[in-house]
Image (spheres, rainbow, N blue to C red):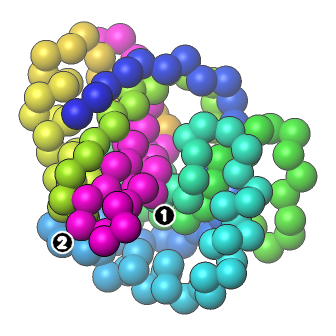
Amino acid sequence: MDTRIVDHPEFRLVGHAARVRLVHHGINPHIQRHITARPTEEYLRLKALGNTEPSGLLAVSDDLDPDYAEGSELTYLHGVAVSPGTPVPGGLDIIEVSAGRWVVIRTTGPHPQTLQNAWSTVAAAWFLSNPWRLRPGPEIVAAPESTNDFTTATGEIWLPVEPA
């Protein structure tokens, strides 16, 4: 696990959003249905639109319950990050993100378990041993880069933070 703190200027998250229920273990069926409802070409179009970090296709969770209660609702957006002046095609949802500080955790390991387990690893290890806490804002997972056989993946988790 490689961790860095990033001061990032404001940006926008654009893509397709839905209100879904939070599921703690396994694949969230609400999110899976949301993602698979769109053709692959749509995600290629979105990926070409992205022009700032975090890069690639993003899984964004916003408006989360502060207690992360199982079954609570959140806004899930599957999309990309763009700079504030980027023209956004019609039909896409937008989440405006203020400038701020982020902890970026880069993980590599078996796919898909690595990113599924990274949040618990971060909460258990990084936040307990560093002088930071979560601040309001979206939580972002950058889609993993996979090996040719899709058994190993590298991805990033972006979490909005402030000094504790």
Residue 127 % position (x, y)? 20, 24
- Which of the numbered marks, if any, corresponds to residue 26? 2
* Distance in Å between CA atoms under marks 2 and 1: 16 Å
Judge whether residue 23 can be spotted in this image. Answer: no
Q: In this view, does 77 lie above or below 159?
A: below
Q: Earlier in the sequence, mark 2 or mark 1?
A: 2
* Among the 4 quarters of the image, the one containing residue 26: bottom left
The quarter of the picture where the C terminus appears is top left
Q: Which of 15/112 is in front?
A: 112
**Is residue 4 shown left or right of residue 88?**
left
What residue do we see at 55% from left, 59% from top?
57
Queried whether the magenta region covers residue 150, the answer comes back as yes
Tell me if mark 1 has few (under 14), some (14-19) or many (20+) residues whose alpha carbon lies within 10 angstroms of its own.
Answer: many
Residue 115 screen position, x and y as percent = 27, 54
Residue 58 shows in this picture: yes
Q: What stretch is highlighted in magenta?
A: 138-164
**Image label count:** 2
Disc 2 secondary structure class: loop
In this figure, which residue is indicated by the disc labeled 1?
76
Residue 92 placement, left or right of 56 = right
Residue name at image x 67 percent, y 71 percent: 44
For residue 113, which quarter of the picture?
A: bottom left
Tell me the residue at 70%/51% (across/down).
50
Q: Is residue 123 above or below residue 68?
A: above
